[in-house]
Amino acid sequence: MAARLSDALYRAGGDSFLTALDAQRTAYLAQEQLVTTRPNHTSNSVELYRVFRGGLR
């Protein structure tokens, strides 16, 4: 969201290209972290289920 707003501000002449590029880089880093975190969340959820339910049957 911030990257889109920053891009719109840049296109309207209200901000520099560097600021828009930095906002885009930050958005990509956040997406990358989400992609690497989701599998951990899933495996942790499975492990919690296994522990509290006494294993998969």
Image: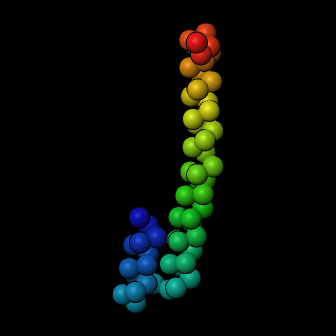
The residue nearer to you, when weighing 52 against 16, is: 52
The residue nearer to you, when weighing 37 against 25, is: 37
Q: Residue at x 59, y 21 (%)?
A: 48
Q: Is residue 13 above or below residue 36?
A: below
The residue nearer to you, when weighing 40 against 9, is: 40
Residue 6 position, x and y percent, is 44, 75
Name the outermost residue toward the top.
Answer: 54
Q: Is residue 48 above or below residue 40?
A: above
Res 54 → quadrant: top right
Q: Is residue 42 above or below residue 5?
A: above
Say how the picture is coloured: rainbow
Q: Residue at x 62, y 13 (%)?
A: 55
11 with respect to 42 (left or right): left
Residue 17 position, x and y percent, is 52, 85
Residue 23 position, x and y percent, is 52, 71
Q: Residue at x 38, y 79 (%)?
A: 8
Res 15 → quadrant: bottom left
Quarter of the image with the C terminus in it: top right
Quarter of the image with the N terminus in it: bottom left
Name the outermost residue toward the front.
Answer: 57
Res 46 → quadrant: top right
User: What is the count of numbered marks?
Assistant: 0
